[in-house]
Image (cartoon, rainbow, N blue to C red):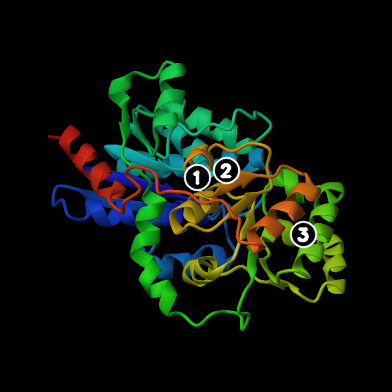
Amino acid sequence: MKILHVVGARPNFMKVAPVMRALNKYRMVRQYLVHTGQHYDINMSEAFFKDLRLPEPDFNLGVGSGSRTRQIAQIAKRIKPVLVKQKPDLVLVYGDINSTAAAAVCSAGMHIPVGHVEAGLRSFDSTMPEEINRIITDKASNILFTHSKSANKNLLLEGVPSYKIHMVGNVMIDTLISMLPKAKKRAKKTPLRQYGLVTLHRPANVDKICTLDPVLKTLGEISRLLPLIFPVHPRTKKQSNCLKCVEKYPELYLVPPLSYLDFLNLQYGAKVVITDSGGIQEETTYLGIPCLTLRSNTERPITISAGTNKLIGHDMKKLRSEVKKILNGHGKKGRIPPLWDGHAADRIAGIITSKNQ
């Protein structure tokens, strides 16, 4: 059985690593890794491959940055010859990035079965490019691997047959569990005893100065109460003029993007995480760290109903208030959702191989 894994950005790498390891246990399976090159920053690509012990990609499409339309068109154009040559029995795609949607549609168009890891997530916000990617990918997929009952429900309401849906748990948590001991052994990237951690990369937050500026100023004010470490995503870094405003806040530390283990090390020790990332909402839920999400919706509602996540939207007054609550010992408590146990990839591998018998 020949399986082609397609990845293109940080969250994909964290999801594909445990799945490849799980499938390695089956002698019937041959695996190939395609890296689209959607993320090209070394700390957001190569360093993650090293940390996660991923093999060198068998194919690197070298797409690079660009508009969503350009990326999808280039990925589809460059992956087609790989699919023609390799003739895989299954293409596995991960998450909701442009690479995911492009690979799924191209494979489906060539009548190659597609498996979607992290299927069924919905924010119900069609202005998010990721939401469009999720819907397109799920429609193109033959096997849909979900991480929660709410994801199953979304797919069933959209008319996906139940036999295609498999609730397996969260492969990102597989990676977190396996890497956490190593991350804990790393020296902290900061001498701070207490600190918060910030990540921002969603277009709705960082592409417009009128949106990003008040967020940065509020983060600066919060840093006077709790020092904040802010690894700056390449997309956010483009707003260099806007970022200059943080110079007046010496306790708001802008740092380059971090490797997975370094970031996990900081995340584990953080008092609070302020983010707009979906994956970090999940990681903080597992780690039991209060998470304040600068979005008005989430495709991961289980992180709110069961976990430590709270939606802040763009209400900067609420952000300040919630941070003060956390500092006063009243941060949100949560629990680990069902099947977030480190064995999701084993379940995926078992399902895939059983279908080929």
Marks 2 and 1: CB-CB under 8 Å?
A: yes
Horizontal and vertical percent for residue 13? 44, 56
153 left or right of 195 in image: left
**146 above or below 286?**
above
Residue 62 vs residue 103, the one in the foreground: 103
In the rendered image, residue 110, in percent from the top left (x then y), is placed at 39, 29
Alpha carbons under labels 2 and 3: distance apart: 23 Å
Instruction: From the image, tell me which residue sits under label 1.
Output: 78
Q: Residue at x 50, y 83 (%)?
A: 187
Q: Which mark is residue 238?
A: 3
Return the x and y of residue 159 as percentages of the image width and height: 42, 15
Specify the label residue 74 is tagged with: 2
Amino acid tagged 2: Gln
| Badge 1 density bin: few <14, some 14–19, many ≥20, Cα 10 Å | some
96 or 226, which lies in front? 226
Q: Amino acid at mark 1?
A: Arg
Instruction: Tell me if mark 2 has few (under 14), some (14-19) or many (20+) residues whose alpha carbon lies within 10 angstroms of its own.
Output: some
Q: If you read the primary sequence from the N terminus, does the residue marked by circle 3 or circle 1 appear first?
A: 1
The mark lying in front, picked from 3 and 1, is 3
Q: Looking at the image, is 321 positioned above or below residue 72?
A: below
Mark 3 residue element: loop
Mark 2 or 3, nearer chain start:
2
Q: Pointer 3: residues within 10 angstroms few (<14), some, or many (20+)?
A: few
